[in-house]
Image: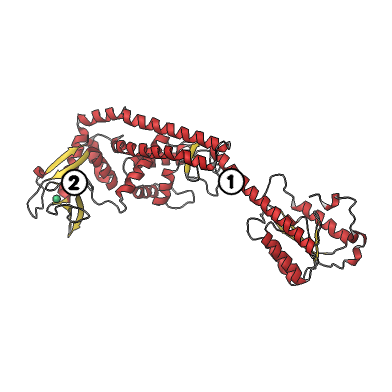
């Protein structure tokens, strides 16, 4: 639409006889929207053109109403606009000047509301610098409605363009904006903060070594490491951080990894795979409450072969074989927890000092299985990235993108599950020898202790013992070693 001032040569009777209008308190409305692409029209220019128009038609200006940087389409409140409507309704304004109908409103429903307000107030004089029309007549109203509908459609197209832009950003691995910076990164979401990156690496290592999120949150509190908002760490926040592709240099989009990001990785994608695998494993084992039993899940009944369950009975903790449909044990075996735990932990510590462990660890470091799985996962990631790029270039539709990702993601899930099994021995990596570990043992969290024990013992079978025995007969215990 060409501004009225540039229309040149158009005959408008109101320009010829300005004094007949009788307008004494016109409202000028201007709005600058957040769109920066080309069409953005400064408030200063809108006001200037509106004032010039008012002068030409001989209207006295009552007040200028200006809303800044808000899209009339978004439905956010526009205070100046609302004030103007109120003033019109109360008869304080007798005319309206605006640059273009799309400054006034971008939603047809708002235009109806505006028309209803000026109509009820008896205000007949509404002028636009660009696209002059008289909303007081049927034709003017129709044109106004059509223009508002066109403006609304443009806004919808704009948000489609923005979504497309986000998709392209994702495919290119560029960060997505947001109000709070991610932990480990500066506000630009690209630059790594060395101190926080160090914390992330430590937390990941300890999580992989078997510590629980809860215990890690406590540790972060003790170390005076705040979250980005200055708060205390809680398990859901920490879980979100650990499972994010961001820390592994991966760009996620709509909740899924779409390829490598433009920023540096803090941990390797393989370590993130292990974190995810461990989370899956924990979720299926369903442990929610803090652990009180270091041998939970590791003991079998010597009578029926069923699992033993932790049972806090009276003052003493016990592991018991439970009957019934939930547990399906014989219900005829009980063992006191403490002496059994002491006994098996000591056995584990001795085992860790033995030569077998060093051999096993050395062998597992070069484990072809884990390497193959990691390579496979890397290949899957590359495929996902290729698909994301095709989607970014619009070679495939969003639907095709989703469909193509499905089998790859299923395969990745399976590979992660296999990796999780191999990852159990992570608990043993970087451990001091058994002798040194013995001195530190009491200071380790229960979840860390349990992870170490479970990495060494596959399970232990407990044979029948004497009723009510308070001590442990070591011959009842048969440990099945993992390493
Ligand atoms: Zn049993």
Task: Give the CA distance from mark 2 to mark 1.
Answer: 54 Å
Q: In this view, does 309 lie above or below 479?
A: below
Q: Residues within 10 Å of mark 2 (few under 14, many from 20)?
A: many
Kindly indicate the quadrant of the structure image that contains residue 342: top left
For the point 19% across and 31% down, which residue is it? Answer: 354
Q: Visible in this render: residue 154?
A: yes
Mark 1 residue element: helix
Residue 137 x %, y %? 80, 65
Q: How many labels does the image show?
A: 2
Q: Is residue 19 above or below residue 369?
A: below
Kindly indicate the quadrant of the structure image that contains residue 27: bottom right
Q: Which of 236 and 98 is in front in this view?
A: 98
For the point 38% across and 32% down, which residue is it? Answer: 374
Q: In this view, does 79 lie to the left or right of 466?
A: right
For the point 43% across and 31% down, which residue is it? Answer: 379
Q: In this view, does 249 lie to the left or right of 421?
A: right
As drawn, which residue projects farthest toward the right? 16
Residue 21 is tagged as: none
Q: In this view, does 414 lie above or below 30?
A: above
Residue 111 x %, y %? 71, 62
- Tag 2–tag 1 contact (CB < 8 Å): no
Single out the mark in the foreground, 2 or 1: 1
Mark 2 residue element: strand
Q: In which quarter of the image is the C terminus?
A: top left
Residue 299 is tagged as: 2
Of mark 2 and mark 1, the one earlier in the sequence is 1
Q: Name the residue under label 1.
A: 163
Q: Visible in this render: residue 193?
A: no
Q: How crowded is mark 1: few (under 14 residues within 10 Å), some or many (20 or more)?
A: few
Q: Which of 132 and 402 is in front in this view?
A: 402
Residue 370 x %, y %? 33, 31
Asked if the residue at label 2 sits under 8 Å from ligand 1, the reply is no
């Amino acid at each position: 639409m060409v501004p009225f001032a540039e229309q040149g040569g158009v005959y408008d009777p109101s320009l010829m006889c300005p004094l007949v209008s009788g307008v004494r308190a016109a409202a000028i409305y201007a709005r600058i929207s957040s769109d920066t692409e080309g069409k953005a029209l400064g408030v200063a220019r809108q006001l200037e053109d509106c004032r010039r128009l008012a002068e030409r038609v001989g209207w006295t200006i009552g007040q200028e109403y200006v809303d800044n940087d808000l899209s009339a389409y978004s439905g956010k409140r526009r205070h100046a606009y609302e004030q103007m409507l109120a003033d019109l309704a109360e008869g304080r304004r007798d005319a309206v000047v605006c640059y273009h109908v799309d400054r006034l409103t971008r939603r047809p429903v708002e235009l109806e509301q505006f028309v209803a307000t000026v109509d009820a107030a008896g205000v007949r004089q509404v002028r636009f610098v660009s696209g002059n029309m008289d909303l007081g007549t049927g034709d003017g109203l129709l044109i106004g409605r059509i223009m508002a509908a066109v403006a609304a459609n443009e806004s919808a197209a704009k948000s489609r363009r923005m979504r497309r832009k986000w998709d392209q950003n994702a495919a290119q691995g560029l960060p997505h904006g947001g109000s709070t910076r991610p932990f480990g990164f500066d506000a630009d979401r690209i630059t790594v903060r060395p101190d926080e990156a160090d914390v992330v690496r430590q937390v990941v290592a300890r999580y992989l070594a078997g510590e629980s999120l809860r215990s890690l949150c406590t540790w972060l509190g003790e170390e005076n490491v705040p979250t980005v908002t200055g708060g205390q760490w809680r398990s859901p926040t920490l879980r979100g951080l650990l499972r994010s592709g961001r820390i592994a240099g991966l760009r996620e989009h709509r909740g899924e990894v779409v390829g490598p990001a433009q920023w540096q990785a803090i941990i390797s994608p393989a370590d993130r795979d292990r974190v995810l695998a461990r989370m899956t494993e924990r979720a299926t084992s369903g442990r929610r409450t803090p652990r009180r039993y270091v041998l939970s899940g590791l003991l079998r009944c010597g009578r029926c072969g069923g699992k033993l369950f932790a049972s806090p009975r009276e003052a003493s903790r016990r592991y018991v074989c439970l009957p019934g449909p939930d547990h399906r044990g014989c219900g005829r075996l009980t063992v006191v927890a403490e002496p059994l735990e002491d006994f098996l932990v000591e056995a584990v510590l001795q085992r860790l000092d033995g030569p077998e462990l060093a051999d096993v660890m050395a062998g597992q470091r070069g484990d072809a299985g884990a390497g193959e799985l990691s390579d496979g996962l890397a290949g899957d990631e590359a495929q996902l990235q290729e698909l994301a790029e095709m989607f970014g270039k619009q070679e495939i539709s969003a639907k095709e993108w989703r469909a193509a990702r499905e089998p790859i993601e299923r395969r990745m899930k399976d590979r992660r599950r296999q990796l999780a099994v191999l990852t159990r021995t992570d608990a043993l990596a970087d451990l001091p020898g058994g002798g040194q570990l013995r001195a530190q043992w009491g200071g380790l969290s229960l979840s860390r202790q349990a992870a170490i024990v479970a990495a060494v013992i596959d399970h232990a079978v407990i044979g029948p013992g004497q009723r009510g025995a308070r001590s442990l007969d070591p011959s009842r215990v048969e440990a099945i070693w993992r390493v």
